[in-house]
Image (tube, rainbow, N blue to C red):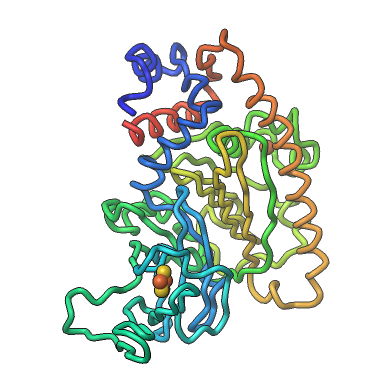
Amino acid sequence: MSHPFPHSVLDNISKPIEEARGLPNNAFIDPAFLQLENETLFRRHWVFAGRQSEIPNPGDIKMVDIADQPLLLVRGKDNAVRAFYNVCPHRGAQIVTEDRTGARVIACKYHAWTFELEGPLRARAHFNGPNKHAKADASDPNCPSLYPVVSDTWYDAIFVNLDGNAGPLKDHLDPVLRQAEGFDISQFQYTRTVEGEFDSNWKLTVENWSDVYHVFAVHPTLNKIMDADARTGMETDRNLIYCRWGYDADTLAREVLPIAQGLQGQARNTSFMGHLFPALCISFHPAAFLLWDYKPLAHDRTKVKLHIYAAGDAATNPAVQKHLDDRVEYYTGLNGEDDEVCRLMQRGRRADGYDGGRFAPYWDKGTLHLAQLVLDAVS
Ligand code: FES
Ligand SMILES: [Fe+2]
């Protein structure tokens, strides 16, 4: 696909926010546009692929789909996490068909070629004729191995970069790491995942995550917790769209989960909300660290997995499990409230009269920034 939009669209997106228009409808309602995003945007950037804690031991294997590509996350005997395409180098069969724990090798069901957890071939049965088996031969330049995908980890998060050209993960995370100063992520342990699906394009879903404006109208419970005076629109920093909101002492005193020790500076009494392009949202709170993993399932359907990390011993302390279950229920409700309004946007964007819309300059800076990031990434 050549450039998907006429120049007028590009011009309108680059205007000052008071006059700008957003992405046109086809960016949200056309399946071909998601295909373009999968071929460009999601392949070129670091994408959150899963949690290290999902594959805690050597031989643990998890299947994931990123940008329509079937991948494997594998913990090797050396304890390192690697990513591979989920395909056998012989005839191209899907090589792993279910998540595994403690596997010793990766074996293909079709002709039983086996591979080490770290990727190289181990053996090929009957390769040279009946009962003439072949072992791996490191000196043979044609000796196959599983096809690697560039991956890296940050804390519990595993990222992949399909085209291998995204540069160091550290650079990608840099705007978040700067905001995280004073917040000690190592104090937080994984505890629960809240899963949900949205009937809306992934961009509408993450834009809505960054949209603090709608809280008063859509989220009665959050509206009570979140101090109205502390609400601001999003700021932008390269691939990061973010804001902070502060707590008063009363709100913090009502927190039923343990608050992290040694929080410094603004980490003590603010939450940080960051949408890291393309579609990982990260929030730091005094009592929780949250990773919101948004993945397109179709042009009009998005999966969210919200991974919750709790401070101190909360993940294992029996006294707070009920509070963590309540938190899951709360976020499930919040996702449901958001799904309803995201669905309205998905339906509305079928209207030919819509021209990308007018922004509310105080609130919508992040949404316009996302439109610009998307345009750059698909061009
Ligand atoms: S396709 Fe995997 S061993 Fe033949
Ligand atoms: Fe919301």
**Quadrant of the frame with the N terminus:** top left
Side of 300 relative to 264 (left or right): right
**Farthest bottom residue in view:** 131
321 shown above or below 76: above
* Quarter holding residue 115: bottom left
**Quadrant of the frame with the C terminus:** top left
Residue appearing at x 33%, y 46% in the figure: 44
Residue 163: x and y, percent?
31, 52
Residue 378: x and y, percent?
35, 33
Side of 280 relative to 336 (left or right): left
Residue appearing at x 75%, y 57% in the figure: 328
Q: How many marks?
A: 0
* Quadrant where ligand 2 appears: top right
Residue appearing at x 47%, y 69% in the figure: 95
Q: Judge by depth and name the residue closer to the eye, 31 or 305.
A: 31
Residue 370: x and y, percent?
45, 33
- Residue 212, visible in the rendered structure: yes
Residue appearing at x 47%, y 49% in the figure: 68
- Residue 83, visible in the rendered structure: no
Q: Judge by depth and name the residue closer to the eye, 57 or 314.
A: 57
Side of 63 relative to 43 (left or right): right
Residue 80: x and y, percent?
40, 78
**Farthest front residue in view:** 130
